[in-house]
Image (cartoon, helix red, strand yellow):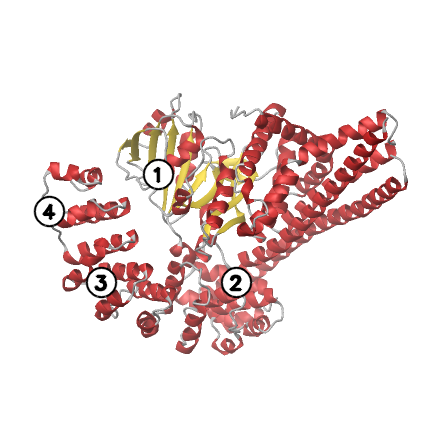
Amino acid sequence: MPKIIMDIIRIFNYVVFIYFITLNLWYFVLNILAYKGLKKYMLRLQVTQPNDKLLLKSAPPVTLLTPAFNESDNCVQSVNSQLKIQYPDMKVLFINDGSTDDTLEKMIEAFKMIPAFLPQTSFLETQKVKEIYQSQTHPNLFLIDKENGKKADALNVGINFCQTPLFCAIDNDSMLEQDSIARVVIPFIEDTRTIVSGGIIRMANGCTFEEGHITKVDLPKNILARFQVMEYLRAFYGGRLAWDIIDASLIVSGAFGVFRHSVVVAAGGYRHNTIGEDMELIVRLHKYCGDHKIPYKIRFIPDPVAWTEGPTTLRTLGRQRDRWQRGLLDSILSNITMLFRPRYKNVGMIAMPFYFIYEMLGPLIEIMGYMVFFFLILIGYATWTYVIAFLLVAVILGMCLSVFSLVLEELSFHRYPKFRHLLNLIGVAIIENIGYRQLNSWWRIKGTWSFMRKKQNWY
Amino acid sequence: MHGSSDEVILIILILMISVFFLITLFLFMVTVYLRISNSFKAARLRYRCKKWDPIILSVMDGSLAPVKAHEKLKWKNSTEYLLHLELYIDMVKSEEKERLLELGRLSSEKLHDLLISGNRKNRLYGVHLLGLFHPEDQYKYLRFDGSDFELTLTMIREMRTVNDFRLKERLVNLLFIFKYISPVYISNILVDMGEDIVPILRMLVMERKGHPYEQVIAIETIRRMHYTDCLDIAEKILKENSNPMVLTSYLRYMEEMGNERQAGMVRHFFKHPVSQVRMAAVNAYLAMCGESTPNDISSFFNDPSVQVAVSAAKKLNLMNNAPFIELDQIDKFKWGNIYKRMVY
C-alpha cells in the first residue's frame, strides 16, 4: 500500500486516539463537577424543603402548556394528573393541535368545557386558533383548539395565551410528581436572572402509576428500556448537572422545562422548521441574552422529576435517536456563530465547541475508527492486540462512566429502592457498552445523514 | 500497526485498561457500599425513631415534662434527632408546639457545636435548627459574613421571626447583599419579621434612591403589611423617582392603600414609556377613584401594550361601573375586542 495512504491512516488513528482520550477525560471532569454539585444540592435539600411555606408563598404563577395531537387515549388522565399537582397558582393550557381523533370531544365532555375568552398576551406567528374553552369544573383549565401546526406551533399558541410570567412546557405523556413544579421554580425565586429551569426525566417503564402519579418505582423488564434508564442517569447526572454548574446548559428537556414568558417571546418563541425545538430554543435563548447583554441563568435541577415512557423496540428507539441527532445538528448549526465567542461565555467557549466536536462529529469519528481498524486488520497492517486493546479501553471507560452515574444516584435520590435494582443497573452499565452504545452511534450517524438530506419528519 | 510510536500507544492503552478497570471496580464497590450504608442508615433511623416517638408524643400531649423526657431520650445530641423532632413541630400548633420546642431547646449544646463547627454542612444544620428552636443564648454564635449565599439566606430565613430587633436589623442589611433574589421572596421574609421593622422599611423607601431594588422590596413589604406609613410621601416618591420598578411598586401600593385625594397624582403616568408603570398607574387610579371617564377608557384601550388593556379590563369588570360608551366608539379602540369581551 502506498506510503502516503498509510501515513493518512496513521494520522487518522492518532486523531481518533486523541479524540477518544479527550472525550472521556472531559466526561470525567463533568462527572466530578456533577459530584460536587450534587453533594451541595443534597445538603441544601435537608434545610430547604420545596414545600417550605415561605417558598410556596413566593412562588410565581405558572401555566402548564400541554400540546397534544391525537391523544384521545390518555388526554383526560394526563390532564387530571396535572390538575392534582400541588402548586399555589397554576393554570393548565391544553392545546389541541388539530387532532383528527376525538381528543377535543373527550376533553370537552370530561371537563365540562364551554367557550371562553382568554386575552392574547403575545403575538408569535402560529396556525389559526379556532376556539378557546374553559372548564366549568376546573376554572384554571383551558383548552385551545387550533389548526394543526406541529408541536412548536402548538407551544407558541400556548405562549400567546399564557397569562403568567412563567410557563412549563410538558409533553402530554409525561407525568409530573406532585411537587415537581414547586421544586423546579425554586431557581426563579432565588435568582431572578433565571430564564429557564429544567428537571430530570426518568423512565416510567416498569413503574406503577395511579391517577397519573407514581406509586411504585421499578426497573423495566424490557432490556432496551433498562439501557435507557442507565443512559438517562448518565445524561442527567454526568451531563446536565455538570453543565449547569459551569453555567453552560445547552439542553432542557422538552418533556419538562419552565420558561420565563417575556424572554421566550422576545427571542421569537419556538421555531417551526426544526425537529429539535426544545434544544434549539435553549441555544437561541443563550444567543439572544448574549447578544443583548442580558444577565441570565439557565438551570438544571436534579430533583423535580417527570416520568416518561421510553421506546421498547429497536425501530422506535432508533427513530427517536435519529430525531434527536437531527435536532442537535440543527440547533448547533443554526447557531454556529456562537462558537468560540467570548460574549457567550462558557456556552460559546466550552459547551458549543464540545457539542460540535464530540456530540455532532463523535458518532462519525467513532464509526470511521471502527471501520479503519477492521480494514487495517484485513490488510495485515494492524494486529488484533491493538484493536482489542482499543476496544477494551472504550468499553471499560464507558462502564466507568456508567458506574460513576450510579454512584451519583446512590449519593442523591436512589429512586430504585431495592438492592436487586442496583445489581441490575450495574449489570446494565457493563453490557450496554457492548453493542448498545455502538448501535446508538449508528443511529446517530443515520440521523446525521437524514439531516444532510434535509429530512424534517418526526416519524 | 507498526513502529515504536504505535508500541507507545499500545502501552498507553494497556495502562488505561488497567487504571480504568481498577477505577471501575472501585466505583462499583463504592456504589454497593453506599447502598448498604444508606440502607443501614435508614434502618438505624427507623430504629431510633421507634424509641423517640413515644417520648415525643408524651411530651406533645403533656403527660411527660420536657425535662424528664430529655433525660429519657437516647441519641438526643444528634442532628438526626433534632430533624426528626422538626417533623413533629411542623405538624402541631400552640401548646403542643411550645412543649416540643422546649424539648428541642434542651439540646442547645448540640446546636452550639453545630454553629461553631468548621464544617459548612454542620453550620447549615445549626442555622436551620437555630431558626426552629430559637434558643436565645445561641444567637451570638451566628456568623454574619454574607459571603456564603446558601448559609446567609438560610440564616435570614430561619431567624426572621426572632424577637430581637438588633438581630433583625442585621438580617435586613444582609438580605440586600444578594441583588438577584426574588423581591417577592425577600418581601415575604420581611413581612414575617413583623411590624417593628416598618421604620427601617420607610427609611429605605425615602433614603435609598440609588438602590431601586431595596426601595422596591421595602415598598412591596409595606404594602403586604397593609401599612399606610408611606402614603404621606407619595408626591415626593412619584416626583423624585424615575426608576420604573420603583414607580410600579409604589403605584401598586397606592392601588391598595391610597385614597381618592391621591388619584390625581397618578394620571400623568398613563403616558409613561414603560408599560408596567402605565399598567400600575391605571390600576391605582381606578382603585382610588372608583370610577372613570370615557376619555380614560379610550386611553387605556388604545394603549400600545395589550397588558395595560387587559389589566384595565379586569379592574373595570370587578368594579362593575364602567362609563357608557357607544359600540362604534369601542370598535375604534385598539383593544376594543378586549373591552367588549371582558367589560361590555
Does dot 3 land on a helix, a strand or a loop?
helix
Position of the N terminus of chain B by quadrant: top right
Q: For the residues marked 2 and 4, what is the alpha-carbon distance in whole angstroms? A: 53 Å
Q: What's the residue type where badge 1 is placed?
A: Asn
Q: What's the residue type where badge 4 is placed?
A: Pro
Visible residue check, residue B333: yes
- How many numbered discs? 4
How many neighbours does mark 4 have within 10 angstroms: few (below 14), some (14-19), or many (20 or more)? some
How many neighbours does mark 2 have within 10 angstroms: few (below 14), some (14-19), or many (20 or more)? some
Q: What's the residue type where badge 3 is placed?
A: Met
Q: For the residues marked 1 and 3, what is the alpha-carbon distance in whole angstroms? A: 33 Å
Judged left or right of residue B252, residue B331 is: left
Where is residue A161 drawn, in percent x and y? Answer: 33, 39
Q: Is residue A442 above or below residue B20?
A: above
Where is residue B73 drawn, in percent x and y? Answer: 58, 67
Position of the C terminus of chain B by quadrant: top left
- Earlier in the chain: of badge 3 and badge 4, it is 3
Q: What's the residue type where badge 2 is placed?
A: Glu
Evaluate if marks 2 and 4 touch, with contact meaning CB atoms under 8 Å apart.
no
Q: Are labels 1 and 3 on one chain?
A: no
Nearest-to-viewer mark from 3 and 4: 4
Residue at (52%, 34%) from the top-left corner?
A: A276
Q: For the residues marked 3 and 4, what is the alpha-carbon distance in whole angstroms? A: 24 Å
User: Which residue is denoted by mark 4 in the rendering?
Assistant: B323
Q: Which mark is residue B257?
A: 3
Residue at (64%, 53%) from the top-left corner?
A: A33
Where is residue B106 drawn, in percent x and y? Answer: 53, 73
User: Which residue is denoted by mark 1 in the rendering?
Assistant: A160
Evaluate if marks 4 and 1 touch, with contact meaning CB atoms under 8 Å apart.
no
Does dot 4 land on a helix, a strand or a loop?
loop
User: Which residue is denoted by mark 2 in the rendering?
Assistant: B150
Residue at (54%, 66%) from the top-left corner?
A: B148
